[in-house]
Amino acid sequence: MKKHNFSAGPCILPQEVMKKAAEAVIDLNGSGLSLIEISHRSSAFVEIMETARSLALELLGLTEKGYTALFLQGGASTQFLAVAYNLLEKKAGYLNTGTWSLKAIKEARLFGDVVEVASSQEKNFNYIPKGYDIPKGLDYFHLTSNNTIFGTQLKEFPTVDCPLICDMSSDIFSRQLDFSKFDLIYAGAQKNMGPAGTTLVVVKDAILGKVSRKIPSMLDYKTHISKDSMFNTPPVFPVYVSMLTMQWLKDLGGISAIEETNEKKANLIYSEIDLNPVFSGFAAKEDRSNMNATFNITDDTLKETFDKNCKEAGINGLNGHRSVGGYRASMYNALSLESVGILVDIMSELERKG
Ligand SMILES: *Cc1c(COP(=O)(O)O)cnc(C)c1O
């Protein structure tokens, strides 16, 4: 039976990418060797890494604009500290919009003063703070563009007079933005790009080299830039699959093309949540995420039927995160509009029966 995978991460990837990735594990491009047994210094792999790096910049519209794309290890969670290690001299500002922001703040506090510029914690992060003042003289300002757990998403980005850093783990490549507004973007691969095991970092070279502390080689962006993202053995499989996914996206027409589909998917589920009294949305309407829709069931007696109907339709990964409860439908790039339609049909059927 066809599955409809709404998992929050690791999550759905395009079927054709999965097939090509599986083939490459057996035999990379007819070479008679597996992707995962050849040297990362071989021309075959160097080409994969270079293609992945240039595709990332191309999709974001940042080619030849002073940025470098890196594929690193340690997840987005390592970037929480790497950002501060490389950029925090005295004081940094953070917008606290959820669990991931909090974790980034905790790591940054090891390196200097952290100003929590605004927070939505008092309402369990169900909205994005707005109208806050950003203090002067920050080493950088850090945002989380999409709050995977709570289902909120920044629709507008502030203009700042310091480097702007953004954790885009769960909405990278999902919508068109002026990416040149940002000085450093990072994203763990497993939400919208590839398997777990690599993290995309896109960094503007000019912001580096300004802190006085010594930085360990593995955590120093300059090390990885100078070695073309091959300072040590890179995660060859996640980089390859990320490359395939970016190629898939480019062939579809790039970010603006997928954004249209993502908007249709989000409109479909949110109009159902808004109209159907059996369900209530968690996040404030104007801040709702196009990637992760969080909602609750208003009548607990219908929960069992809903869960059963979802299971029978092949729907997977719909449980909400433990800190929010309820349900979360994650609708990353590779999830089809048809899959969202199937979920929405089950939701509306429940109203008719209930
Ligand atoms: C999942 C996620 C992370 C953590 O990523 P890891 O790769 O597991 O360290 C960080 N930020 C956001 C927004 C996420 O969704």
Image (cartoon, grey):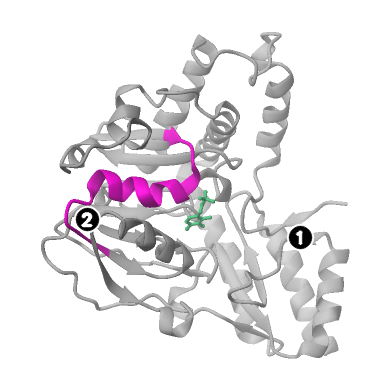
Q: Is 115 situated left or right of 120 in this image? A: left
**Residue type at the position of mark 1:** Asn
Q: Is residue 331 above or below residue 275?
A: above
- In the image, farthest residue toward the left: 137
The CA span between labels 2 and 1 is 39 Å
The x and y percentages for residue 29 are: 65, 15
* Placement of the C terminus among the 4 image quadrants: bottom right
Query: How many other residues sit within 10 Å of disc 2, few (<14), some (14-19) or many (≥20)?
Result: many
**Residue at 57%, 46% in the rendered image:** 190
In what element is the residue under mark 2? loop
For image coordinates 48% across by 67% down, the residue present is 99
Residue under label 2? 140
Q: Is residue 250 visible?
A: yes
Q: Where is mark 1, residue-wise?
A: 316
Pinpoint residue 25: horizontal percent, then vertical percent. 70, 23
Q: Is mark 1 within 8 Å of ligand 1?
A: no
Numbered mark located on residue 29 in the image: none
Amino acid tagged 2: Tyr
Q: Nearer the viewer, residue 150 or 277?
A: 150
Q: Which residues are magenta?
A: 71-93
The image quadrant of residue 292 is: bottom right
